[in-house]
Image: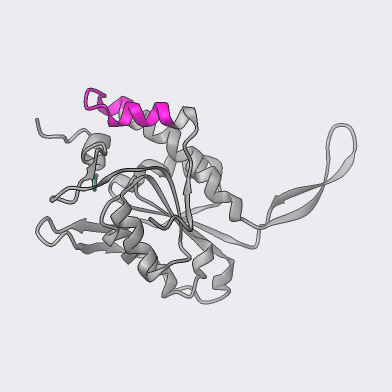
Amino acid sequence: MELNNVRLINNPVICQSLTVMRNKKTDSQGFRFAARKISRVLLYEASKNLPLVDKDIETPITKCTVKDIADDITIIISPILRAGLIFTDEAIDILPNARIRHVGMYRDEETLKPVWYYNKVPAITSNPEKYYVYITDPMLATGNSMLEAVRLYVNKNIPIKNIKSLNIIAAPEGIEFLHKEFPELEIITAAIDERLNEKGYIVPGLGDAGDRIFNTVVV
Ligand code: URA
């Protein structure tokens, strides 16, 4: 499989948290805690594309010139409802100026296609090249919802190099599907699993991420 523009982040801390998430015996609180640990690392990775500027400050010792994130940019965190919300607390900790723009799609269980139910992302009137967008969804499965979300921002003239897909687990099918339309889209993920099953779930995966985060697993 072509792995251009896929950044796989799999250090031991991530592996450990992913093991917790995959284990069906992990309860909802443990699942969320592990997911947040991984999402924080993925967000740090994504932030590597933010422009830096020089800033003059004074430490308690001396004046100096240091680097800081440019303040003339707009950072958008776009969680795909509902599982993508697990990234938001971490995101606003790390990037306090980020705007959170929720996008809501549910998966039609027959067609596996996304159906929009929430999109209030406004038009972008000036300098779209100064927007940096991180779209979050713990599971990149078929890629249908992520593709819709990426299109939403590309249609607002935000350069594809400024848009990233942040996923805890990605399926090869989802990666291929996204890259067919947007080969330059960078996907940042903690794992690439084997495949999708006939219901569109990632194998081995971790089940339904939304249900496990929000404790709605039906037993
Ligand atoms: N969404 C999930 O939550 N899990 C999957 O395996 C696929 C899509």
132 vs 203: above or below:
below
With respect to residue 12, does 154 lie above or below?
Answer: below
Give the magenta range: 15-30
Q: Is residue 23 magenta?
A: yes
* Lateral position of residue 106 relative to residue 39, left or right: left
51, above or below 215, in the image: below
Which residue sits at x=61%, y=55%?
Answer: 50
Residue at 14 percent across and 59 percent down: it is: 108
Answer with left or right where residue 6 lies relative to residue 110: right
Q: Quadrant of residue 178?
A: bottom left
Q: Is residue 72 magenta?
A: no
Quadrant where the N terminus lies? bottom left
Which residue lies at the image location 22% right of the left edge and 62% below the top edge?
114
Residue at 66 percent of width and 58 percent of height: 51
User: x%, y% of residue 104?
Assistant: 28, 58
Q: Could you say where residue 10 lies in the image, as x and y percent from the top left?
A: 47, 36
Query: Considering the image in quadrants, where does the C terminus appear?
Result: top left
Give percent across and percent down for residue 168: 38, 42
Majority secondary structure in the magenta region: helix
Q: Is residue 61 above or below residue 123?
A: above
